Amino acid sequence: MSYWPSLFGGMLIGLSAALLLLLNGRIAGISGIVGRLAQGAQVPANAAFLIGLLAGPVLFAIAFGRWPQVTIAASLPIILIAGLLVGFGTRMGSGCTSGHGILGFARFSRRSIAATVTFLVAGIAAATLMRLVG
């Protein structure tokens, strides 16, 4: 059953986001956490969350006996441009897909729902354009 790893990962993301909100009153938005860590704010909590995020593949390997399969079919320049656009978009949208898409949706935040729909439409458009252009 190939959906088990994805289901397990999604459950862990949801659990960690819910626990961060319930225990610390903070939204689990990765861009905000990394931004605060870079500014030296709330270092222990932000560093712990980031370390936990980076430990995900290791926990996956322990749970499933193999490393997660990741395939990147784009060139390095495209990946760099995409990363810059994502960074620009998270600043423009006051958050990223993790904060808006996971907790914003759960809280029925209109702003987060609009942001997530925008992320999805832009992603679909970009993927379609990349397939057409090559």
Image (cartoon, helix red, strand yellow):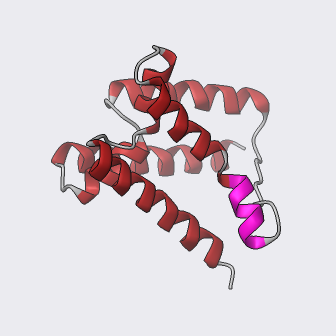
- Viewer-side residue, 46 vs 116: 46
Residue 8: x percent and y percent?
Answer: 57, 71
Judge left or right: residue 16 versus residue 95.
right
**Magenta run includes residue 114:** no
Q: Is residue 1 visible?
A: yes
Q: Residue at x 76, y 55 (%)?
A: 70
Using the image, determine if residue 72 lies above or below residue 42: below
In the displayed orientation, state which residue is furthest to the top.
39
The residue that appears at 41% across and 24% down in the rendered structure is 42
Which of 62 and 90 lies nearest the eye of the viewer? Answer: 62
User: Which residue of the protein is positioned furthest toward the right in this rendering?
Assistant: 66
Residue 117 at least partly seen: no
The number of callouts visible is 0
Residue at 54% from the left image edge and 43% from the top image edge:
126
The residue at the point 71 percent across, 70 percent down is 63
Residue segment shown in magenta: 57-64
Q: Position of residue 15 (x, y in %)?
A: 42, 61
Q: Quadrant of the N terminus?
A: bottom right
Whether the magenta-drawn stretch holds residue 63 is answered as yes
Position of the C terminus by quadrant = top right
Q: Position of residue 127 (x, y in %)?
A: 58, 49
Q: Main secondary structure of the magenta part?
A: helix
Spot occupied by residue 62 in the image (x, y as percentages of width and height): 76, 65
Image position of 45 with respect to 131: above or below = above
Q: Is 133 on the left or on the right of 19, as rendered? A: right
Residue 57 sits in quarter: bottom right
